[in-house]
Amino acid sequence: MHVFALALALSSALGADEVTRVKELPTTEGRPAPHYLANRAPLVPSRLLKLPIGAIAPQGLIRRLLDLEVEGMSGRLPEVSQWCKYEGNAWSDPTGQGHSGWEEPPYWLKGFGDLGYVTGNERILAETKRWIEAILKTAAPDGWFGPRHARTSLDERGRKVADFWPHMLILNILQSHYERTSDARVLPFMTNYFRWQLAYPAADFMGGYWPKMRAGDNLESVLWLYNRTGEAWLLDLARKLHASAAPWSKGVANWHGVNFCQGFREPAMFWLLSGDPADLQASVRNYDTAIRTYGQVPGGMFGADENARPKMDDPRQAAETCSMVEFMHSFELLARFTGDPLWADRCEEVAWNSLTAALTPDLKALKYLTAPNQIQLDHANKAPAVQNGGCMFAFSPGGVYRCCQHNVAMGWPYYAEEMWAATADRGLATLLYQGSSVTAKVGDGATVTIVETTDYPFSDTVTLRVKGTARFPLYLRVPRWSGVPELTVNGRKLAAAAEPSTWLRVERAWADGDSLTVRFPMTIKVRRWEHNKHAASVDRGPLTYSLKIEEDWRRSGGTDAWPEWDVLPKSPWNYGLVLDERDPTAGLTVSVKPGPLADQPFTPDTVPLSIRAKARRLPNWVADKNNCVTVLQPSPVKSDQPTVDVTLIPMGAARLRISAFPVIGAGPDAREWNAPPPPAAVTASHCFGGDDVDAVADGQEPKSSNDHGIPRMTWWDHRGSEEWIARRLAKPRTVSATAVYWFDDTGRGQCRVPKAWRVLYQGADGRWQPVSPTGEAGVKPDQYNRLAFKPVEASALKIEVTLQAGFSGGILEWKIE
């Protein structure tokens, strides 16, 4: 790849400035050695180089968020998480014995330590050091470290294999520790472990579900070590890891949300070694597939709650908080490895629209799932609107969010560490705009400090002040949403024509006190989601705006120090936007709150910006029985309600929100918004929390008995028992047959077709009586099992089943003739 640049060759009275529009950043190939660690041959030459941890000091908004995290859930997680207790922990015991020997402590430490590094908090630094000292002491002579039981875990086939997954997290912890401290013990520790991995039998290598899906994390750590030691055998291990990983190079290997958000990048990690553009393109293609299929919504995420599922692509589908921080980390790595500014745009979209809304404003609790359209947060079951049952939406600091509760810690610290990068031509680049101070070597080796001041993402202006003297290039990322940038140096305007998703290269002999100001014009834009019911979203800069819904916060559990919260709506939410067809932004106006940015601007009351819009109510758009917003219907839609002004606030400030709106229309193209059908009036002896009794009458046709793409009703986890399901008819009528499509997940779970079943009916006297069959009560999978019987006058039907011994069962669809 070659640098493509349009030199504007600007001269001034001083003759000192050169501004260039750059589509591809230069590489280290054929250049003088950079000041910071770059890829060793034969790896792909570097474009952006990570600065040492500590070189970037966060300031402004990002610093305030980090300070909230210090005193919030992540900064004090041992107070609420049983897995993070140091005493008796398998990760702190030198023999690897004890409790919590899987992912939870490493997940937390991965962000907790970096939180200390970027804030300098002494309490966190001391606690991090205590854990790392203990982990280093767990090393076995052959290179293994950590919990001993993980060396012989059982994989999905019952084989004894090493579980490499939690160790990948520890490797990241040690990488950060080394980058911050240069601890001489880290490189030999990692080297010995990787030698052990290289010798591990290939047939069992990366055995089990999680390691295979996330092997790219391990691969990244191996290349990190190779760049520091140059030992060629590490590249053999890198090839072994790629060969053993889930086949992300061939397409989406897994639709589990978190697996995808970190796994999709694996081919791009291997591209650093292979140099084959097809490997890099595979990660791009994976991302595009997920966003095209399940991510036609604002906020930068895609619907995977917990897995992405066919037809479940509405804006009410949610993403785990785990997925958000893993997606951000993937974007940060890909932006640095490739120099492509699009990855930084994507990171900002997730960070400022989705992650901010996933936690309480004080960062003391999070919710497991966050969706673009989400109208009530409570502890009640939301299945089957989302995949799993139980408490998925309420804010809780601990107890119910075992993965996200620990993993969320890395979100803001990693973001802070990637805001700046060194460039291959001994310059600096702004990757993620936020208040900061960066100190780095540039040009011929001089050290300079640049102080960045901005209220981004609310403000469109960034000011950079230079301390020191040196000649070097400074690269400014031009966001994909930006208008033509406006650039001034020391108050003197420079021509800066640049396309979105490119770089502006400003080279000059910088003097102490020089000031560069760049403005990326933010205008209101309306996005229409053509592949998601033609819904509309309103954007300004990197922020999407959501309906302001009055929030009623109710304490629902926890302790006084760590409360749990439900959030209920106190104002209507079922609005459609009234947009001008010729100019959709014509009726949208920005309102700016005077004064400095609030310490925590991501709340409905403290946001510095809001947008006024015209809207009408849609009375038939209602919540489902579990208080989830129902799915969108195709726009344009009709409404006879009066047009009113509504307030839109940033998505990240709206814990309750509508961010993908129906659009109000008129004329022949506008549709009526259909009211939901009445409840199916189905009851059962038992139904698993993640399933729904109404699924048996929702009209969704199964593809097979093992169809996990549609809702179902199961009696899980009842096994071998006598169960029943009943369905009340809208009015008494004559019935002569019924047909059942059984759920059977052989090869995946523990549900099977039943051993036997019979049908009863409820007559005028209210008593249940068995029907008189004229055929067999079938139990065949992958088809409807129709049972005919002598006609009866019924107000309800009941199916009684005998489950197979040791197994549960369920129904996908139930028809009544």
Image: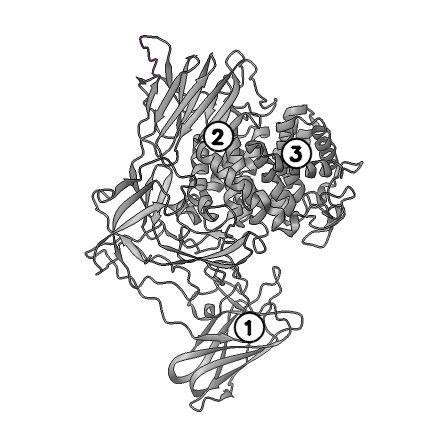
**Residue at (26, 62) in percent of width and height:** 672
471 magenta-colored: no
Residue at 58% in and 63% down:
745
User: Which is more N-terminal, label 1 or label 2?
Assistant: 2
| Category of crowding for the residue at label 2, using alpha-carbon neighbours closer than 10 angstroms: few (below 14), some (14–19), many (at least 20) | many
**Residue assigned mark 3:** 174
Residues at marks 3 and 2 touching, judged by CB atoms closer than 8 Å: no
Q: Secondary structure at mark 2?
A: loop
Look at the picture and state if 565 lies above or below 23.
below
Does 579 sit left or right of 52 as displayed? left
Q: Residue furthest bottom?
A: 765
**Element marked by disc 1:** loop
Give coordinates of residue 70: x percent, y percent.
Answer: 55, 40
| Location of residue 235 by image quarter | top right
Label 1 Cα neighbours within 10 Å, binned few <14 / some 14-19 / many ≥20: some
Q: For marks 2 and 1, give the CA distance.
A: 52 Å
Q: Amino acid at mark 1?
A: His
Residue 419's label in the rendered image is: 2
* Residue 164: quarter of image: top right
Magenta stretch: give its range: 8-13
Image spot of residue 529 (x, y percent)? 34, 47
Q: CA distance from mark 1 to mark 3?
A: 48 Å
**Residue type, label 3:** Leu
